[in-house]
Amino acid sequence: MSRKEVPRAGLLKAALAGRLTNAQGGRALGLSVRQFRRLKRRFREQGARGLLHALRGRPSNRRLAQPAREQIGVLMTTTYAGFNDVHLTEKLREVHHLGVSRSSVRHIRLALGRPATRRRAAPQHRSRRPRKPALGQLAQLDASPYAWFEDRGPVATLHGVIDDATSTPLALCFRPQEDLHGYVTLLDRTCRRYGLPLELYGDRLNVFARNDAHWTLAEQLQGHQNPTHFGRMLQVLGIGFIRAHSPQAKGRIERLWDTLQDRLTSELRLRGIRTLAAGNAFLPEFLADFTRRFAQPPADATPAWRPVPRDLADLLSCRYQRTVARDNTVHLGARWVQIPPGPRGRSYAGCRVEVRERLDGYLRVLYHDTLLASQPSSDPAFVLKPREGPGQMRRRGPRRGTLHHALAELGRAQLPPLRAASSASPSCAPEALRARTPAPGPAPVSSRRRNAPTHPWNVPFSRRQRALNAPPIIKEDIST
């Protein structure tokens, strides 16, 4: 008997003995008086076996037909191998028009002895952060390296951004690895399709924000570190950034990766997609279907997206400071841009200009916010990557062969002047020579005698500085 049928025997015995009425027994069991009379008659004729349901042990009239069960079993092991129960149920309904439930698919899978695709772990206690009320107030972005194409293609990294209010994936992009190009592509697609979000929520990757403890003198004076290339793009667009301290803090996009690693991988396998280009071409179709199934309505129907500036492509660029060469060219890595003459044939040689490298590889050279020259990219497979980070230039030492390098080597050598040895007596010459011998280390750049203080090379060029360096004039007292 079931738990529902066990207490019926005692009440029916009391009713047969006359200790309670049929109405009292029906109210105790939650049955009508007529049904209680039927149970009392069956209990009197068959005993405890009469309390069991009459259809127990017989197949249900709504049971799935055997041909349909066999068809589902074949699809489960061939076409849809590796699909989870919910995903397989959706495919059976939409593609094969088989109206089955998830529990029926689960029973068929267990009957075939096939384990579940993902083992469900016990839930861990944590406090859930409430969603933002409006669309566009907060978006979470991250990347997931995974075998998305399994053994058919290369290991790729899926970059994605999801809205916090509705769980809508705003943009997805396959890249060979997690890099700046993938995140700028996500930001560009999100802004062009929806608008500018108020804030972004990401991890502590050095692409988003600085995670080093080095401060230059200029950064100490201004009170904050210079941002990364991506951080500078967010600043000019007016988008805030929140750095998560754990994966659970941005759990919405982490749960998205769990779903996509199951569903998207199965869809790619079903279509035989094996390249990054084909995968990126399929993502818009997948996003439309995914949003229709899993997106939730926001609490506030008014979205918080802001309008996109016209020069969005120029704002989403890496910026570098360069000095114009004598032939009026600006170099950025292996690329160089020729600057045309300015007004009245002016030359820009020696001027500090700003070079902007956009997402499509387009170079723009600006001088005081004035466009001097531009150059498109000749490589169709251009990848935007930082040519120099915020800390790369400041840690770079003087180049070998320059005056700064020679002065640095002389400062490290710390040689005593030769006059100390020449002024010493002949008896102490060996001691003086030993005193001149430098400590083991890098060899000095030059062993020539230092110039005298009155040497023309030591005379400053500035007239004011020469006046400051001149010895004071002592005036005689003429009163005496």
Image (cartoon, rainbow, N blue to C red):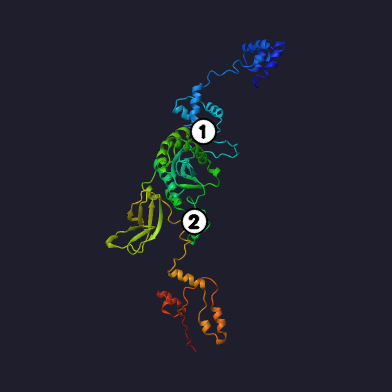
Circle 1 packing at 10 Å, graded few (<14), some (14-19), many (20+), is some
Residue 327 visible in this rendered orientation of the protein = yes
The residue sitting at the left extreme is 344
Q: Residue 105: x percent and y percent?
A: 52, 28
Residue 475 shown left or right of residue 335 in the figure: right
The amino acid on which the numbered mark 1 sits, given as a three-letter code, is Asn
Q: Residue 1: x percent and y percent?
A: 65, 20
The answer to whether 386 is drawn above or below residue 450 in the figure is above
Residue 96 shown left or right of residue 435 in the figure: left
Q: Secondary structure at mark 1?
A: loop
Disc 2 marks which residue? 225
**Residue at x 53% of width, y 18% of height:** 61
Do the residues bearing badges 1 and 2 touch, measured as CB atoms within 8 Å? no
Q: Residue 372: x percent and y percent?
A: 32, 57
Alpha carbon separation for disc pair 1 and 2: 47 Å
Q: In the image, which disc is placed on residue 175?
A: none
Q: In the image, which disc is placed on residue 84?
A: 1
Viewer-proximal residue, 45 or 197? 45
The answer to whether 379 is drawn above or below residue 8 in the figure is below
Residue 306 visible in this rendered orientation of the protein = no
Q: Nearer the viewer, mark 1 or mark 2?
A: 1
Q: Secondary structure at mark 2?
A: loop
Indicate which disc, 1 or 2, sits on the residue closer to the N terminus.
1
Residue 328 shown left or right of residue 129 in the figure: left
**Residue at x 67% of width, y 12% of height:** 46
The amino acid on which the numbered mark 2 sits, given as a three-letter code, is Gln
